[in-house]
């Protein structure tokens, strides 16, 4: 029976509520012919039929445009959407700016337990944040840098804020692209750091990242005083985001200085919650909810927190493939998925992840061909016509 995979039964009664027979096509056609039924239909030549469709949903809202501006004139712009992401087919409604990728730089990179693929990419620069930032711009074409000041946290190195200021000033001298001011997570030290770094960069329009429910009352006034953008961070809660946005505006923060961050969970570890919240925020903003009509940021670097991204082949027993590919793919997947529901600012770690994400997005923001070749289709992945 193992050899033939056939079983013949004789004198057997079958009792079943449901019985299905699958018959070979030749048997069916032979039986149909014997019964005088029509034979198999013949396929004709395929033809293109001109048609059109109309999007019934109207989007009366518009997402605020946010600018990052260096004193040298170099700038980046996010936001300005009038339709959902990649709705390029609505005439006159194409969104103006693709998501901006910002490259992570840490002040204590040589003292952190970083995944090996990251260390390999930035080998020789992890101990010098200014050179790290310059390398990211010169080598990988970074359009924006995020400076994460982790060393000031009493739980790490407890550096004085003055050291953070020195590193920040060195980075501003080393690169000519906008620099986002990141924090450590320690509320007290972060407020001190934002106060000092926002003042020393008042000739620029940067981003303070981030103000949360424990610090917004102190951090937002720094952004107002020195004309910086401010990232308002909440934890996967639509109502809390609306409230914080309103509270920030009540403190004088202009609408064109607000960036939202509802929290980027990582793929496989709650990502679906982030996806849903991002989508609801963006759709609400486009439908006219002014308190949610702001660009959205995502810390897609969080993807490296997933064990599938960093675990070595030895520990994973090679079940997941090569680590040097897994980490970047994990980060790319996070960023691409969120870009489908409104991601405007992607904070990324691995340069290959950042470059791949940007190249993919640029494909979708390209011009769609005016006409398709007969029996051909346009491949968005390669950007070419195929048959």
Image (cartoon, helix red, strand yellow):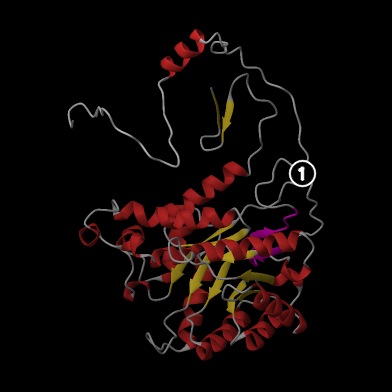
**Quadrant of the drawing holding the N terminus:** top left
Which range of residues does the magenta coloring cover?
Answer: 64-82
Q: Is residue 78 magenta?
A: yes
Relative image position of residue 60 (x, y in whole percent):
82, 57
For label 1, count other residues whose C-alpha is less than 10 Å away and answer few (under 14), some (14-19) or many (20+). few
Q: Is residue 267 above or below residue 42?
A: below
Q: Name the foreground residue: 9 vs 248.
A: 9
Relative image position of residue 235 (x, y in whole percent):
56, 75
Q: Is residue 194 magenta?
A: no
Q: For residue 59, which quarter of the picture?
A: bottom right
Relative image position of residue 210 (x, y in whole percent):
58, 77
In percent of the image, x 45 and y 67: which residue is there? 302
Relative image position of residue 375 (x, y in whole percent):
60, 20
Direction from residue 200 to residue 166 in the image, left or right: left
In percent of the image, x 62 and y 59: which residue is there? 344
Q: Secondary structure at mark 1?
A: loop
Residue 123 visible in the shown view = no
Residue 315 visible in the shown view = yes
Reading the image, the residue beneath label 1 is 55
């Amino acid at each position: 029976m193992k050899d033939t995979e056939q079983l013949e039964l004789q004198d057997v009664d079958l009792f079943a509520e449901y019985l299905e027979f699958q018959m070979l096509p030749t048997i069916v056609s032979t039986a149909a012919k014997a019964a005088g039924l029509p034979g198999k239909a013949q396929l004709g030549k395929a033809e293109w039929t001109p048609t059109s469709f109309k999007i019934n949903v109207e989007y009366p809202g518009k997402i605020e445009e946010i600018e990052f501006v260096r004193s040298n004139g170099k700038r980046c712009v996010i936001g300005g959407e009038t339709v959902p992401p990649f709705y390029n087919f609505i005439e006159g409604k194409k969104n103006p700016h693709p998501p901006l990728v910002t490259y992570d730089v840490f002040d204590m990179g040589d003292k952190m337990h970083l995944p090996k693929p990251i260390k390999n990419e930035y080998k020789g620069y992890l101990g010098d944040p200014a050179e790290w930032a310059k390398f990211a711009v010169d080598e990988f074409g970074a359009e924006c840098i995020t400076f994460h000041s982790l060393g000031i946290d009493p739980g790490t190195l407890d550096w004085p804020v003055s050291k953070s200021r020195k590193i920040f000033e060195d980075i501003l001298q080393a690169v000519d692209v906008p620099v986002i001011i990141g924090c450590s997570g320690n509320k007290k030290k972060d407020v001190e750091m934002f106060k000092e770094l926002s003042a020393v960069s008042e000739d620029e329009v940067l981003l303070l990242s981030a103000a949360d429910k424990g610090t917004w009352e102190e951090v937002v006034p720094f952004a107002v005083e020195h004309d910086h953008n401010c990232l308002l961070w909440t934890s996967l809660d639509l109502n809390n985001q609306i409230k914080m946005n309103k509270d920030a505006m009540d403190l004088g923060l202009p609408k064109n200085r607000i960036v939202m961050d509802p929290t980027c969970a990582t793929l496989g570890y709650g990502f679906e919650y982030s996806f849903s919240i991002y989508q609801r925020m963006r759709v609400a903003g486009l439908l006219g909810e002014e308190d949610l009509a702001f660009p959205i940021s995502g810390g897609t670097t969080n993807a490296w927190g997933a064990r599938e991204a960093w675990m070595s082949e030895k520990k994973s027993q090679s079940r997941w493939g090569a680590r040097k590919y897994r980490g970047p793919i994990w980060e790319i997947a996070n960023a691409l998925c969120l870009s489908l529901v409104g991601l405007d600012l992607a904070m990324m770690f691995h340069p290959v992840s950042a470059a791949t994400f940007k190249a993919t997005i640029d494909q979708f923001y390209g011009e769609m061909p005016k006409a398709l070749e007969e029996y051909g289709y346009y491949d968005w992945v390669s950007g070419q016509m195929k048959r």
